[in-house]
Image: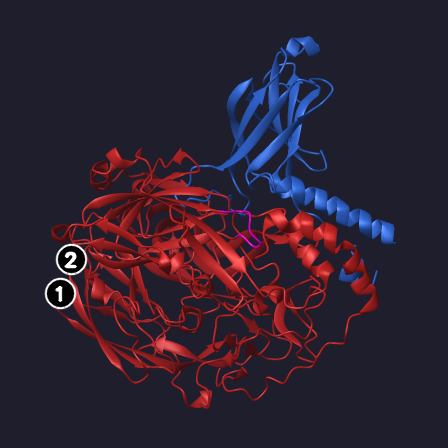
Chain colours: A red, B blue
Amino acid sequence: MIGGKNVLFTLAFALVPAIASAQQKPTKPAKKPSSMTGMPGMNGMPADSGRRKPGAKPAPAMHDTSSMAMGSMSMPIPMPAGMPMIPGLVGLKPPVGEFLPAKGVDPRTLPLANPTQIARLKDGDTLDLTAMLVRRVINGRAFAMYGYNGQVPGPLIRVLQNATIVVRYHNRIDLPSTVHWHGVRLDNHNDGVPGITQDSVMPGGSFVYHVHFPDAGIYWYHPHVREDIEQAMGLFGNVRVDSPDRDYYSPVNAEQTLVLDDLLINGDTLIPFGKDAPDFALMGRVGNVLLVNGEPRYSLTVKRGAVVRFFVTNVASSRTYNLSFSGAPIKVVAGDVSKFEHEERVPSVVIAPAERYVVEVAFDKPGRYALVNAIQAINHYAGEFAAEVDTLGFVTVGATPAAPSYAKQFATLRSNAKVTQDIDRYRQYFGKAPDKRLTLTVSISGLPLSLPLATVQFMNVDTAYYAPVEWVDGMPDMNWLSTSKQVRWIIRDDATGKENMDIDWHARQGSVIKLRIFNDPKSFHPMQHPIHLHGQRMLVVARDGVRTKNLVWKDTAIIPVGSTVDLLIDASNPGAWMLHCHIAEHLGSGMMTVLRVDPAEAGGR
Amino acid sequence: MLGGWLGRVLLAATVVAAADRAGPFDISLFNTQNAPDAHGQARLVFGQSPFGVAVTADGRASYDVRITAAGLPDPSTLGRYSAYVAWAVSTDLSRWDRLGTVTNGDNTVGRAEVNKFLLVVAAESTATSPHTGPTVLHGTSPSGWLQSFLSHPLFRGIPP
């Protein structure tokens, strides 16, 4: 393991050999790897429609990237514009096989993916949900990918609160899979976690889920097998659970579901995935083509003064977004599993992987409002921040006034007494000592491969500063090379020292657990972690010792680097429930444990 | 050439050694000859946000700045000054954002929304007057540890 405390030692004792090494071993020419042309699904073949013409404007929401040494395909990873590649990385490839969907299948034979369709289901209804191969056309290029029922995102399931539906899942992709019902406090054996609640559904196989929805709000479903591949390739969909209370949300002129995602594409090719282990294990795969509802450009037309409610879900593997609408006022209404105690005006919407937020936006003036993701990237070479703005789409506002006008309702920040009353039952536990303390860290072996020592030194020194949140991948070349074979992300039990799945964690049904999580900054590569707990709901009661003023029930909470976050878990749902980082590659690199909630009648520890 | 390279690496080692003592939210404050007995620490805490991470619309972190100070003399002992004021200062010193007044003890002085900044505590005529007075404590935001490596020979493809 390369730890922060070892840096000075490393620098001092590696100095002379580093210089000597650099002097004696001039950089070798880039090793030319095997061509990737001809790989099934690898090439973005000309689409049957919407093909981009030479000289056409660059695709929207695509970072300004340049690939290194693309002539030889020695480094197919797009690098941020102006950033040199780290010395020693040219020609290296992750020590894993390559995988893309539909090996041996001509993508042109696959059905074109459709946009989401709404599946309105009543209590007791049955839905057939099939994970299948589809052809997606993105910026004029077609790729073999996945979709549920041929749709990307998958069907938007609309149900009434407290409904139970039956989902007959059929796996027709080329990998084992399951369906996890993210955020839903359902019966444990329908949770979709292989090895915990069920076996993987093999290609060609089926599984029946009985899904009960006790809480109103916006939820989502996705595989819990190789999320880094299956989710990234299109297996995700929303469930919107409607409250029977007609006044649950304020009246608005329109409602929209926004599913945020990104894809890593270099020119005409998808960057392949690690076949036998996830690559991009350090930071997760951060795409360079940003998608809304599976498409590179979002579009909405409304009338002047319209108030629109957006149900936002981040299904990206690693990217945390900071969304805004060109200055249009935003009101945040609800989070993962409930409404907030109090509605708030916010300048933007920060949403980590797997989180959901419900926000309302007023478009007061005619014109075009850009939906943007605006962040501060770090240029690790220059040691400076760099503002990045990606335009995800536009809301066009016409001159005709919206009728009826909901301006007055939008201006009102509601307090949700029912939410507060519900939370009041738990306030007595806010100040108690933590029942469990977990530390998040990382262990690395075998990296950085055979890099020059000067490069190792650079990387060590670069970690002198740890951004609490890394919004983009500042070193995609190094990140690509890291796989779960070298990188082990860790949840460590402070009390026992046990890690990840070795942690023996039990609670009694009905208990209230105070969980304190510390994201240790003193490691080779600390990073924020969106920590997700299955099957329960939780409150973020404090961050770095500061009590949260406006509470909301959550199932996923971002833990910035160096932060200590107190979570209060309502352990009401018996079963074995995963707690894990929702950066897909971190999960694939071991960052998971299990909370076992023992039935009340059985007692518990 | 070698000396320059050596110097840069040793400087970087010093930077790392210092940074290793603190977390990503901690700022060590150093005194000046104006107040040789003064010392202090600052901590950046994300402002309250429904999202847990408070940022501006363009993505800059939004931190409440907490300063714990000790050994500050009465500001009037330094001249015609009545208060100590904390400032978030751009690294080129062109912009001074007033955070709030500082006294010995714990202070939550205000909100900083700058990527990289110097934290300066100075004696001022009043708590609201423009900055003119002597600096007594200063430090740098943790992001100040970011170093430029663009001139490193290896990063220009040139063996040292």
Instruction: Give how far across and how far down residue A23 sits, in percent.
Output: 83, 64
Residue A213 versus residue A435 in the image, above or below? below
Instruction: Give how far across and how far down residue A59 sits, in percent.
Output: 56, 70
Query: The numbered mark 1 sits on a residue in which chain?
Result: A
Determine the main secondary structure of the stretch shown in magenta.
loop
Q: Residue furthest right?
A: B1
Q: Amino acid at mark 2?
A: Asn
Say which of A470 and A2 sits in front: A2
**How many numbered markers are drawn?**
2
Query: The numbered mark 2 sits on a residue in which chain?
Result: A
Residue A462 versus residue B72 in the image, above or below? below
Q: Circle 2 sits on which residue?
A: A162
In the displayed structure image, the side of residue A599 where residue A286 appears, left or right? right
Q: Earlier in the sequence, mark 1 or mark 2?
A: 1
Residue A343 falls in image quadrant: top left
Question: Residue B91 bears which disc, if any?
Answer: none
Q: Amino acid at mark 1?
A: Asp
Q: Label 2 neighbourhood size at 10 Å, few (<14), some (14-19), many (20+)?
A: some
Distance between the alpha carbons at the discs numbered 1 and 2? 8 Å
Q: Secondary structure at mark 1?
A: loop
Q: Residue at x 11, y 51 (%)?
A: A601
For the N terminus of chain A, the quadrant is: bottom right
Say which of A402 and B111 sits in front: B111
Tell me the magenta residue range.
A520-526
Question: Residue A123 bears which disc, if any?
Answer: 1
Instruction: Give how far across and how far down residue A51 sits, in percent.
Output: 53, 81
Say which of A84 and A444 sits in front: A444
Residue B92 falls in image quadrant: top right
Verify CB contact (< 8 Å) between mark 1 and mark 2: yes
Q: Is residue B157 visible?
A: no
Residue A576 versus residue A176 in the image, above or below? above
Q: Secondary structure at mark 2?
A: loop
